[in-house]
Image (cartoon, coloured by chain):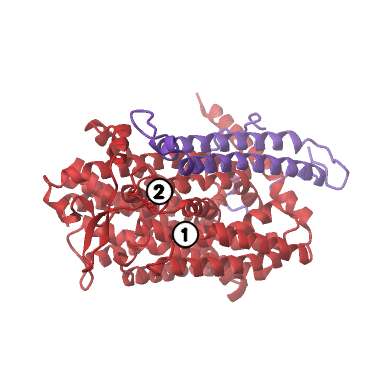
Chain colours: A red, B purple
């Protein structure tokens, strides 16, 4: 491993370990503490942690890669990712927190008064988590290839990255629980923003003019890699899927047709609402209002993050071709000035502007982004297995120690499964069908989440007539249609890219099924009682009043102690 | 109790130490009546849907302009950037933030004004304890 890489990566791991140790010291050792940080995460801390949770390899490496390879069509990735929190803030955050359950399946089971809803939601939650974990493993492998020059015995560098990151993050989650993970994620997001800010400043101070470069890139046809007759990649002009003419950087159609672009954004927007690891975070807020304001902060923070990622993707497209002549390492990564792996766009910029240290910083940032997201996913899985499976079905009389142990075992098992799947996957197989393999795989997870959990969460909150039968039917139909569509899209060379972003069809179908089945079945009992908890603000007022009393009491004590 | 219609003052996690392990609502001594919640719910739903429509129009409008208007992808603003790239890559994020701030402030104001006022509405719910 390069010395600078080892130092930077070691510093990042040490930082996380210290945070975990402090959190471990402050944990009360209860299930709520382990899964939900005692439900007392403040707005700013939780917003930063949600961003750390959400900003995965798909955002840190994938968005810049998508912009680099697909221009405006790649920009819509970032737009969709950022837009996803608008419905969360408007429709979901406050009511979800107010019902006050421990996981998304738990929330749905209480809302629909149905254990069947819980069981179906558990299965879908685990599959969404697994679908989201897989691209993180791929990202960890790709990042390690650039960061390290060493590998574990019997493993490639790609495999070593997967194993090292999985072991580290699973250990930290098991030890630190939700509190340690939250603080880590908040800190990690600040580090990621710092890295992007440094890169943006470095690029701009080097004379990069954002508007002028977009204009220059758009003046000539976009170049991309395609497999030649002999299977060897070669550079060719990208043809617009809308006009059939040579595509340009700021034109739509480089990767998606007109419908495909809409389908992509709809999938990302509605998928966010169904992501268990992200929605679980709102359960750690002290009140519904705090959860709502947390979502508002998140919209602002991710907007800033993605606007920088888009700029850097553009900078990579603009600067890399001209830099290959001076840098042998860059020539090895490119074919005629075009990166073979688009995910290397941001990392290459780091090395161009910061040398080996810059490479190490950006690559470590990528690993941090991955670890942060994986931690959230593992905690969500732990909450689901510990609460919805173990305590409900396997051992209803579980002691606190047993419930915690079940959650920790679930973390370990899921970490191993995702690592094994990551080791089996060859990312080169998928690069032709989607602009960026990491962003593409994450989009598949969004597609499933947006077609299954998102409709039953949102409709369950806002339509009193929604029933358990309707929710189950919607989740089953949404899951079947979205997974079949994504399967064809990912593994068929000739399939339309629209198939990998199916929510506009499968989510709509799920909503229709839910409405029809709900209309035909008996309404949920005691909806009024649920509504008072979910849409009332009594809990919030109590929490804020008690907080105010606590502050007053602390202030009074301080005054008494003061000389 | 609240800081105003926005009610968006920062919450310190240490404010909530009392709730470290309290999942139950035993410590909550405030209640809402059915009538209050029903009325507030309908207002909240209108607010959420209204702001969501603005959000959807902003995204759909940007996408439609990208697909349908030549000057949107060929025109030059701000140092040569196209309006389409500027919209998708920068301006939409600001629009999203404005929408959620406005929606959250309105929702908070509705909760402040319509609930916890000590009225029992049609009498089908408990009175707020004061």
Up the image or down, A562 lies above or below A428; here it is above
Above or below, A205 relative to A55: above
Viewer-side residue, B123 vs A473: A473
Q: CA distance from mark 1 to mark 2?
A: 13 Å
Q: Between A209 and A374, which is closer to the camera in this rendering?
A: A209
User: Residue A14: which disc?
Assistant: none
Say whether residue B121 is left or right of residue B66. right
Label 2 chain ID: A
- The local crowd at label 1, few if under 14, some if 14 to 19, many if 20 or more residues have their Cα within 10 Å, is many
N-terminal-most mark, 1 or 2: 2
* Residue lying at 52% horizontally and 29% vertically, measured from the top left: A561
At 37% across and 62% down in the image, what residue appears? A433
Query: Looking at the image, which residue is at 66% across and 64% down?
Result: A109
Circles 1, 2 touching at the beta carbon (< 8 Å): no
Can I make out residue B38 in this image? yes
The answer to whether residue A176 is seen in the rendering is no
Residue B91, x across and y down, in percent: 46, 35
Badge number at residue A73: 2
Element at label 2: helix
Residue A292 location (% of width, % of height): 59, 42
Q: Say which residue label 1 marks.
A: A498
Question: Residue B57 sits in which quadrant?
Answer: top right
In the rendered structure, the residue with mark 1 lies on which chain?
Answer: A
């Amino acid at each position: 491993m390069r010395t600078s890489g080892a130092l930077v990566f070691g510093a990042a791991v040490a930082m996380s370990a210290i945070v975990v140790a402090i959190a471990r010291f402050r944990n009360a050792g209860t299930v709520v503490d382990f899964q939900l940080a005692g439900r007392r995460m403040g707005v700013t801390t939780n917003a930063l942690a949600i961003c750390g949770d959400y900003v995965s390899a798909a955002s840190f490496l994938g968005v810049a890669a998508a912009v680099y390879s697909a221009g405006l069509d790649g920009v819509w990735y970032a737009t969709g990712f950022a837009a996803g929190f608008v419905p969360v803030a408007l429709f979901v955050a406050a009511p979800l927190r107010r019902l006050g359950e421990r996981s998304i399946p738990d929330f749905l089971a209480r809302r629909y008064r149905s254990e069947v809803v819980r069981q179906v939601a558990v299965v879908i939650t685990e599959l969404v988590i697994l679908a989201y974990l897989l691209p993180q493993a791929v990202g960890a492998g790709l990042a390690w290839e650039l960061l390290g020059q060493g590998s574990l015995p019997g493993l490639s560098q790609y495999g070593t990255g997967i194993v090292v990151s999985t072991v580290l993050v699973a250990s930290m989650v098991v030890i630190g629980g939700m509190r340690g993970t939250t603080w880590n994620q908040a800190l990690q997001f600040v580090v990621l923003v710092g890295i992007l800010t440094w890169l943006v400043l470095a690029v701009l101070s080097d004379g990069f003019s954002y508007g002028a470069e977009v204009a220059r890139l758009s003046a000539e046809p976009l170049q991309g890699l395609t497999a030649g007759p002999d299977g060897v990649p070669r550079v060719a002009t990208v043809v617009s899927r809308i006009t059939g003419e040579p595509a340009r950087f700021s034109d739509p159609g480089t990767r998606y047709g007109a419908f495909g672009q809409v389908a992509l954004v709809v999938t990302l927007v509605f998928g966010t609402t169904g992501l268990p690891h992200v929605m679980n975070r709102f359960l750690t807020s002290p009140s519904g209002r705090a959860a709502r304001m947390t979502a508002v902060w998140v919209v602002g923070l991710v907007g800033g993050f993605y606007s920088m990622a888009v700029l850097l993707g553009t900078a990579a497209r603009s600067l890399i071709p001209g830099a290959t002549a001076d840098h042998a390492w860059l020539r090895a990564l490119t074919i005629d000035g075009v990166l073979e792996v688009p995910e290397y766009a941001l990392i290459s910029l780091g090395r161009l502007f910061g040398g080996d240290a810059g490479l190490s910083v950006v690559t470590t940032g990528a690993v941090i982004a991955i670890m942060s997201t994986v931690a959230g996913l593992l905690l969500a899985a732990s909450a689901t297995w510990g609460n919805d499976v173990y305590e409900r079905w396997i051992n209803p009389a579980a002691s606190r120690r047993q419930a915690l142990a079940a959650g920790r075992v679930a973390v370990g098992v899921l970490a191993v499964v995702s690592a094994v799947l990551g080791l089996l996957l060859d990312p080169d197989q998928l690069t032709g069908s989607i602009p960026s393999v990491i962003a593409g795989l994450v989009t598949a997870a969004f597609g499933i989440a947006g077609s299954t959990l998102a409709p039953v969460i949102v409709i369950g909150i806002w339509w009193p007539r929604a029933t358990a039968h309707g929710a189950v039917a919607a989740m089953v139909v949404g899951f079947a249609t979205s997974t079949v569509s994504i399967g064809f899209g990912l593994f068929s060379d000739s399939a339309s890219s629209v198939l990998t972003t199916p929510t506009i069809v499968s989510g709509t179908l799920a909503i229709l099924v839910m409405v029809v089945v709900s209309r035909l079945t008996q309404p949920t009992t005691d909806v009024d009682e649920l509504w008072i908890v979910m849409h009332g603000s009594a809990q919030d007022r109590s929490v804020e009043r008690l907080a105010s009393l606590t502050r007053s009491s602390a202030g009074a004590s301080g005054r008494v102690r003061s000389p | 109790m609240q800081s105003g219609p926005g009610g968006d003052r920062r919450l310190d996690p240490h404010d909530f130490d009392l709730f470290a392990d309290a999942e139950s609502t035993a410590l909550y001594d405030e209640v809402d009546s059915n009538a209050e919640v029903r009325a507030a719910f309908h207002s909240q739903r209108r607010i959420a849907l209204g702001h969501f429509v603005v959000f959807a129009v902003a995204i759909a409008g940007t996408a439609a302009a990208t697909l349908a208007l030549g000057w949107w992808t060929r025109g030059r603003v701000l140092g040569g950037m196209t309006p389409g790239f500027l919209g998708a890559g920068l301006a939409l994020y600001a629009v999203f933030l404005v929408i959620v701030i406005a929606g959250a402030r309105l929702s908070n104001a509705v909760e402040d004004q319509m609930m916890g006022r000590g009225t029992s509405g049609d009498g089908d719910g408990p009175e707020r304890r004061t």
